[in-house]
Amino acid sequence: MDGVEPTRTDGSIDESDESAAAGRVDDGNGGTGDASDLGGEGLVLGYPNAEEPVVDGESIAAEPGAVTALVGPNGSGKSTLLKGLANQLAPEAGSVVLDGRDVHAMDTKALARKLGLLSQESTSPNGITVEDLVYHGRYPHRGFFERTTEEDVSAVERAVELAGCDHLRDREVGSLSGGQKQLAWIAMVLAQDTDVLLLDEPTTFLDLHHQMEVMEIIETLRDESDVTVVVVLHDIEQAARLADRMVALKDGEIRARGPPEAVVTEELLADVFRVDAEVVATDRGPRVTPIRARHGK
Amino acid sequence: MSGEGSAVDGESTVGGEAARGRSTDRSPIGWLLDAKLVTVALGSLAVVAAAGLVQVSFGAYSMTVGQAWRAVLDPAVLLDPRWLLNFVVGEELMRAITGFHGELPELTSETLIVWNIRLPRVLVGVLVGANLAVSGAIFQAVTRNELASPFILGVSSGAGLAILLTLVVFGSLSAFLPLIAAFGGSMAFLIVYAIAWKNGTSPVRLVLAGVIVGTVFGSLQTALFFFADDIGVVQSAIAWTTGSLTGTDWEQVRLALPWTLVAVTLSVAGSRQLNLLLLGEGTAKSLGMSIEKVRFALSGVAVLAAAASIAVAGIVGFVGLIVPHMVRNLVGSDYKRLIVGCLFVGPALMVGADVGARLGMSVITGADAQVPVGIVTGLVGGPYFLYLMRKQQHMGEI
């Protein structure tokens, strides 16, 4: 299976690729130009019991090696679109292509070695430690009878360090606060060591400190690695600050896409979020001050 | 949080060192040396040894504990491969392996009674207990429900129906009863799976399908009791459907042992998949697990283990339900340790309960009668479950 993995521009195949990825995280200059490409073409996504699809014929491309943020009001189809990109939801029409291959046709483990997903609701059993949880992230890299390798250990160490949960590693996941839990889950997807990372509302329900922790992790990924990140965010200011590109959805339709300054405008806020707001450009990206909700159409 | 920055830093260095030290624990057997697991294993072995000793000492032919010990450790058997093979694999195979054609050396009557009658019953108890416990542990992960038992997906009702059909309708086939019972259980499991399947399965649909099949098969089973005109047939049917070790000997050991080894090996090998299933379907899928294949394969292993125990002891309730619970409380929910713990605690409970089943009646009433061991496990298991229910806030989801 590994033999048919598409080779990268540097010619290395999957196995050595992981150490290459490791090097990339540490080298600190990033942008070597071999980031993964993820895009959806004409996606129609819905749920079995609903008549109307949630997302009806949209195309989206994640900027390789950069952070793409999906924003939009509740029920706009952000999470559905992300699930479609992650192959968690089979599209009724259209296809998702990762580095030139249809994700639906890929072997599930091979896909999980290239694409990681952090879902919104993650449940864990009691009595599992953070370290055990993070080791589960290595699942797609191991065969049925394979044991923990040096590579697994170093990937886990790296992930734990990057997620900043070294001090939590022996704690039981069930005993952690919501913010600490999220860091543990992020460490797990980081240990998966993928080229593409999809995060579904990673900051929602977290206190400010942990929101910033999560944002910093994503910033580190953006600045110091070639990981292609697609993140669904509730907070439009946060999204603007974090993302290289933004995609705004409403009613399952993409209403705007582009760099944050182009997307976060007073017109878009009125159209997509139905609020009157003031947008001021600052060094840290646009600052949004919502003024009032718009009623009616 | 910022106020405790230095403390956190100090902690993290310590944590880092501990982790480096501990990463050796991820070696193939390092995790087995977990203090709690070792304690559980040794405690269970002590229970099995004590209960086993009671079983071999007492009975119609009475002997002292010392005599029983000497019979168990009789060098005339232990140091004679011919006798050992004669017991474990049977006389024919022993002769084929050793090429020995003469008469086996004489044994004392104590040794003969212990080795021929009492010891194999203890061994069957060990196998049944281990199988049921492992099977229950697997089903609890597959359905993500702590209240799942080996019989949750229709195995017991299928086996029960097959037993009744054999005893009442196809009496001539009763020699094959163990195999027919195991087969009936497996068939019911497949029917449950087929009913639950709709673009894939889910834990809830599997459990509901199990209830449906259980209800229908249970009714058919009860209906068949009406056609049984012989009290012997009814008693035999009750013994099978409540689970009994009465009259088991080396033949049952030979029947169950190979399947037990297969099921146990596969379940230990599958423990990482079981752990991942506990993280939920979404996470397991995003980590690249082919969830339907894994779920079916693991259920198949659990059914194999349950069928092996049904074939030799009938449908023994509660062991598969409470043993994984007890072990989880003792060693935590990591399935590698949980499965290994089940391999010890299951036999301890089963062999212990069988002491009550075999000797309890004669102690209480003085009557020389045995009850099916399933009655004792139910009497022990019910109150334990009540205790758990009172103690734990959350029962149900793992």
Image (spheres, helix red, strand yellow):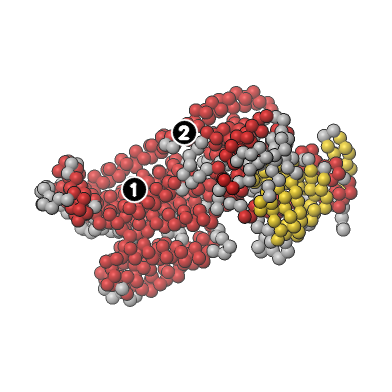
Please identify the quarter of the rendering in which residue B250 is found. Answer: bottom left
Q: State the residue at coordinates (38%, 37%).
A: B39
Left or right of residue A249: residue A97: left
Q: Label 2 lies in what chain? A: B
The image position of residue B366, as x and y in percent, is 21, 55
Q: State the residue at coordinates (55%, 60%).
A: B201
Left or right of residue B36: residue B67: left
Quadrant in which the N terminus of chain B appears: top right
Q: Which residue is mark 2?
A: B25
Asked whether residue B221 is in view, the answer is yes
For the residues marked 1 and 2, what is the alpha-carbon distance in whole angstroms? Answer: 27 Å
The image position of residue A116, as x and y in percent, is 64, 45
Q: Which mark is residue A197?
A: none
CB within 8 Å, label 1 to label 2:
no
Tell me if residue B233 comes above or below residue A45 in the rendering: below
Q: Label 1 lies in what chain? A: B
Q: Is disc 1 placed on a helix, strand or loop? A: helix
Q: Which residue is mark 1?
A: B347
Left or right of residue B157: residue A194: right
The image position of residue A39, as x and y in percent, is 72, 50
Closer-to-camera residue (B170/B47): B170
